[in-house]
Image: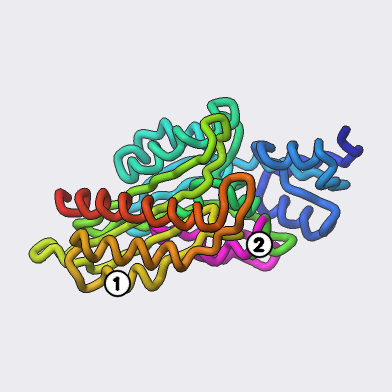
Amino acid sequence: MMRAFDYLQPTTVAEACELLKRHGARARLYAGGAYLTIVMKEGLLEPEVLIDIKKIPELRGIHFDAGEGLHIGALVTHREVETSEIVREKFPILCDIEKQVANIRVRNVGTVGGNLASGEPLTDLPQVFIALDARVKISGSSGERAVPVEELLVDSYQTSLAQDEILTRIVIPPLPPDSGIEYIRFSSSSVVDKPCVGVAVCLALDPAHKICESARIVMGCVGPTPVRASRAEQLLIGNPVQPAVIQEAAKSAAQECRPVSDLRGSEAYKRAVVHALVRRALSTAAERASVN
């Protein structure tokens, strides 16, 4: 049973930030409620003030800017991303991923901004956004700032958002030419919608010689936050993406992640899954980059 709380409905980001500043740690933002309502019902979180931001129009919408890239408003639902023609044209991988997120009921109400702002470690989008070098725009009582998604997530269920700040938008820069991206998620149970491991890979190749010019390998659900496989990325850059190189990079990635043993599998099991998924994702991303 939920504890009683005050319910506020600001209509602008500035008003919402001011309310957060005024009520401090007593307040929580409410958008889709996919995460918040669960923890409130379980008594894990008992805010005294709930600030409903669903009536703030500037937090909605999807559009593409040739300079900055794809803009996704914080209140855009998973279902809206899944069915967006703009997203399908510019970043079809996101539409495909969203089909795997939870179930249709959750996707209809859960928001992309809420997914990131919750700091949920067992989810799909953060590692994909990091692989795409996405950043988030943040507003607070002291002004606006932008940070990479990689810097937003600091620990399990913890972000770098200040008490009076709101995540307003996700911005994904245009992909470089001759690039390919792949995301593979694996769940240890067919009845659980949360991934056990999720691997996102983005490669850019030299069009003439098919040499890897840039690489981002991001492993999710094997640490409190998504993990960049930096050493594995360096093994790829400057080399042709051939089976032997892919194998070495996958081996390195499995060593770089930080899994813990739990109900979804042992540490050794998860490292083995990471190795297999990175190898597959690199091969697919390289193929896609070669045909672009």
Determine whether the residue tagged by mark 1 lies in a helix, strand or loop. helix
Task: Kindly identify the residue that appears in the image at 54 percent across and 35 percent down.
Answer: 189
> Disc number at residue 16?
none
Q: Is residue 191 left or right of residue 239?
A: right
Task: Kindly identify the residue that appears in the image at 33 percent across and 49 percent down.
Answer: 182
In x, y percent, where is residue 246?
27, 61
Q: Is residue 252 left or right of residue 50?
A: left
Instruction: Residue under label 1, please give it.
Output: 235
In x, y percent, where is residue 88?
33, 37
Q: Is residue 198 left or right of residue 258?
A: left
Seen in the picture, residue 130 relative to 8 is either above or below; the reply is below
Instruction: Residue under label 2, please give it.
Output: 161
Residue type at mark 2?
Leu
In x, y percent, where is residue 121?
60, 52
Q: Which residues are magenta?
A: 131-156
Seen in the picture, residue 194 relative to 119 is either above or below; the reply is above
**Residue 225's image quarter?**
bottom right
